[in-house]
Amino acid sequence: MAALICEVVYRGIFQKNLAARITRGIVLSARKSGRWGIAFGRYGDSPQRNGIPAKDFAIVADTKEELEQNMARYEPKHVDVTIAVDDTLSKGVESWAWYGLQPINRLTVPDGTLLMTSLQSYDSLLQDIHKKDAPYKLALIRAKASFSGLWVYREDHTEVRILGALAKIAPSFLTLQGVGEAIRESEWGSDLKVDSAKKAYERLESRDVTMTEGNAEIPYSFEMPKWWEMREGVTIPAIPVGKPKEAGKGYVPERNPYFKKFTTRTMRPVVNFDTCVKCTLCWIQCPDSCFDVMPDGTYDANMEACCGCGVCEAVCPVENCITMVNESVFDDNASQWEMWRKDKQTYQAWMAEKIGDKNATVRSHGFRFRGQYEKELEKNFEGGGAEITAGIPGENAQHKEG
Amino acid sequence: MAETTTFGNATQILEPFRGVKRVTIEEYFTSGHRTCQGCESALVMKLMVKASGPRTIVLGSTGCMYVANTTYYTTPWVVPWMHTQLGSSGSAALGTAAGLKALMRKGKMKSEPINVIAFCGDGGGADMGLGAISATLTHKEYNSLILLYDNESYANTDIQLSGMTPYGANTTFSPPGKVKRLIHTRWKKNMAGLMAAGHPECRYVATVCASYAVEMMNKVRRALTIGGPTFIHSLDPCPKGWDYDPMLSHELGELAIETGIFPLYEVEDGQVKYYGKTKAIVEGRARKPVREYLLKQGRFAHFVEEDLDYFQAKVDEMWEKWEIPAVVPFRRLDATRAALSAK
């Protein structure tokens, strides 16, 4: 290897600034380690949208010539290190552009590294990460996904921990000392952050993944239209209007067959059909029309269409009727309503387990109030990752009841 | 389908939905658009065509609702939809309405009232497309609705400042700095009031917010039923540009109304009618302090007390000093009125 190619796969907008800092940090660290580097985003991901998976790249090379050689590509086809800064991306990503679903390790070279921030076990992650036809390393930084927004950044040291880990993974390109110098010189750097990078270097966990391990699911893909198939005026057929769910009752809309959006989801709604009062609010307020109308008048969030915004939980007037739960604790996109119809007791037990998991229901998906990120970090440092409740819809719902 | 006539043009009679249970079950703007989690503008699109029904043509000028919805040769639209240029929503609405009328007159298509809706963002509508929209609103012989979805920035291209960006907000063009805290110090345009005041033959102008879905849909239905050129201004919370947890889209829409920052009203044949929570404010309910709304958004995270006070004072002024509170910014004409009545 004379060049190190890294991709950062992240949640659009939520982690835009984080990814920019990581790739920029890689280049600065490379310079401090006596190498050359460049950072760039993927053109097709712009304009970014909250939650829709996006990619940034960083290339480090021994010489300027090698760097230029790598820059001549539109985007790298193979990467030495894939960095995923949210572990729900392990289920695969459907980018903003029309590509179908791509496994998270798709571009990782044989014997390359997939570096993730996650609190999950290797086995749990490998249930989601697709099988690869070559062995690779799975390296983990023990951290929650760091989400913020465009204007207020969450200073939880994720960017420097990634840099520290990279110095461990690719010592011939980035030295820990170079990483430290780069961090100290950055406008967002500090001595504390240099220490964090060092700790990440020391504590990085990794294990080999064999070709037999991983999720065996075949990711969905689409046949792209050929130019000669395009119609006059570049028109395309509209989506047909939907149909009743069954026996003339309920309603299921037809959906855009070429963009499913569910890999945008970081949390999903879990619905208690027994306490639903059929008020229609989740259905009518869903920006993604993901709720199918069931024959009994309840609403089933279609997991092929839901992108996990959480508006349904916010508007639902019944306590705990809709609860957003982290995507990592689910294995498929099956219908919750069908499961409930089949066996209500089993469903209640399943639901209680999902919404009772405090680690999976705690939410930090961007700005709610000033000082929120600092408060959250304080609680994390004190241990336990306690729930931050100010300004969240639970409070809002109580207010509405009153 | 029932029909009515305005200026000799038939329109569909779309009675208001009486309650949420009576709302059309079908979706005419469906899943699979590439908008942000919690995108209120996508919700506006969905509700807009739910309200108008299947016999509708939608024209979209460039902006999030064009780029996110219909790029890469796919679509979430069930009704016919066509893209038009950034500043052309007015021209596209007028041209389509006139084209339909001509085709029907010549017998080239079945004569029936078809809803024509053109949407534009605040950049495409309030900045670039203002002239074309204004022209369309004077063409009383053609039925069209122009819906401005206002997320208060050029959100598609990553949040540049528009004429509708609120005072002091952080955008790509107005980042707060150490030397200068507020870069954007202009007050937002008053689009609905401007359209209502400036176009005497436009029979219907309304403001809406998708947090109040049924009322929002009923305003769309009223605009399409009354006929002629009509205009609706919708305030759409934007998790990307306003920087908040997408879960709170609905709540922020409510807060914009409850604080009195965005009033809900309709102007039908020159009569101003407030509705919803705005009506309650007009009838004496206290407005919530603007800080409850502003401090929930990252774009105002740099505000100090002084900025909050200024913002509050400007909103107070809207309600206490304007000739028609929160609608038309002229100061009260008490002296003139007294003089006129003395004659």
Image (spheres, coloured by chain):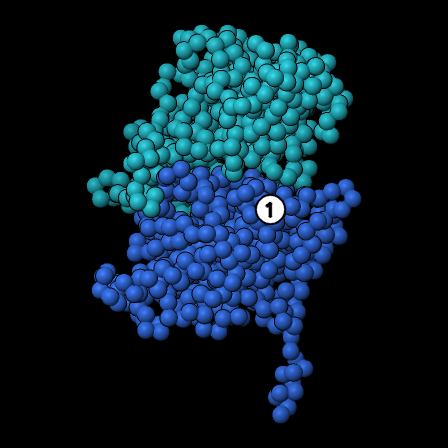
Chain colours: A cyan, B blue
Q: Which residue is mark 1?
A: B160
In screen coordinates, is B95 left or right of B62?
left
Whether residue B253 is visible here, answered yes or no, is no
For disc 1, the chain is: B
In screen coordinates, is B188 left or right of A338?
right
A133, above or below B7, in the image? above
Nearer to the camera, A234 or B115: A234
Q: Residue furthest front?
A: A65
Say which quarter of the image contains residue A304: top left
A115, above or below B215, in the image? above
Q: Residue A87 location, x and y as percent?
A: 51, 23
Q: Residue A109 location, x and y as percent?
A: 49, 13
Nearer to the camera, B46 or A379: B46
Nearer to the camera, B5 or A301: B5
In screen coordinates, is A278 left or right of B342?
left
Secondary structure, mark 1, is loop
B319, above or below A227, in the image? below
Q: Residue B72 location, x and y as percent?
A: 40, 37
Nearer to the camera, B256 or A240: A240
Residue type pointed to by label 1: Gln
Q: Residue furthest right?
A: B179
Q: Residue at x 64, y 10 (%)?
A: A171
A121, above or below A157, in the image? above
* Mark 1, other Cα within 10 Å: few <14 / some 14–19 / many ≥20: some
Q: Residue at x 42, y 13 (%)?
A: A132
Q: Residue B290 location, x and y as percent?
A: 64, 54
Q: Residue at x 64, y 15 (%)?
A: A63
Q: Quadrant of the N terminus of chain A?
A: top right
Q: Residue at x 57, y 41 (%)?
A: B158
Whether residue B323 is visible here, answered yes or no, is yes
